Amino acid sequence: MLKNPDAFRRIVTGVALLAWPVLEFLAFLTSPPSSEHDPAVFREHPGLVQVSGLLFLWTALSLIPVILGLAHLLRRRAPLVGNIGAALGLLGAGHALTLFTTDFYDLALAQILPDAQAEAVTARVGELWGFLYGMLLPGFLAHVGLFTLLIGLVVAGVAPWWVPVVALAGTVVPFVTMEQSTAVQSVGSLLHLAAYGWIALRVLRTSDAEWRTGVTAPPPSPA
């Protein structure tokens, strides 16, 4: 497989499409029980903070082959959409990788400083323009890029209409359930798994020749 670039890239894309929602699901499940970076909660659950932080980091990392693979699917039928979606998605994923390292700094602050000082430092970081506009907000471009690519797949006839709808719902769920338990927040990851998992199976079942020349529309469902 390593000597066959088409097979290697196709399989990496398919596995990544399955892996990133699973990693996201595990990251939410292992998150400490708090919607904020509460120093007391972080200090009480140092293991969960580090495990979930690593899982979120790996989630963002796995988005890179996902984005490149989705753009590859559009290179024949919608190259402009694919290139724009890939550029936005990769920019967002790169910034997301830096964001998830902050959990480890907040944990260290919680373990060394009094709660009030730890909270003050975290709040001050959030006010810095370099962090807010150079790291935090650009991270959301990953969602914009992914949704752009999914819309392109629908327009190109590669994916059904419900895939971007379910994927968007999966993205929204954690934001609207921030005050709920981590188990509730993780439901969004299952929606992501349904949407991206469909594409993953489509990619993994595709031949190397079809992957190389361009994935066509899925065969119609039997009546």
Image (cartoon, rainbow, N blue to C red):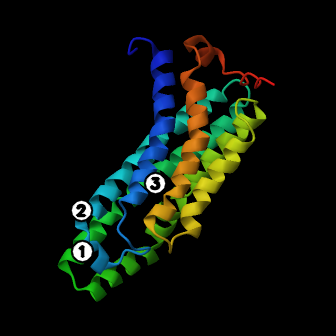
What residue type is disc 3 on? Answer: His
- Label pair 1/3, CB-CB below 8 angstroms: no
- Residue 141, visible in the rendered structure: yes
Q: CA distance from mark 1 to mark 3?
A: 26 Å
Mark 3 or mark 2, which is nearer the start of the sequence?
2
Residue at 46% x, 31% y is: 15
Please name the residue that numbered disc 3 is placed on.
95
Locate residue 35 relative to residue 30 in the image: left or right.
Answer: right
Three-letter amino acid code of the residue under disc 2: Gly
The answer to whether the residues at label 1 and label 2 have Cβ atoms under 8 Å apart is no
Q: Residues within 10 Å of mark 2 (few under 14, many from 20)?
A: some
On screen, residue 46 above or below 140: below
Q: Quadrant of residue 73?
A: top right
Find disc 1 in the rendering and name its residue: 43
The residue closer to the viewer here, 41 or 10, is 41
- State the residue at coordinates (70%, 35%): 153
SS under mark 3: helix
Which of the two residues, 141 or 111, is positioned nearer the viewer here? 111
Q: Which residue is denoted by mark 2 in the rendering?
A: 47
Residue at 38% over, 16% down: 2
- Amino acid under label 1? Arg
Q: Is 222 displayed left or right of 31 in the figure? A: right
Name the secondary structure under disc 2: helix
Closest to the camera, between mark 1 and mark 3, is 1
Task: For marks 2 and 3, give the one nearer the viewer.
Answer: 2
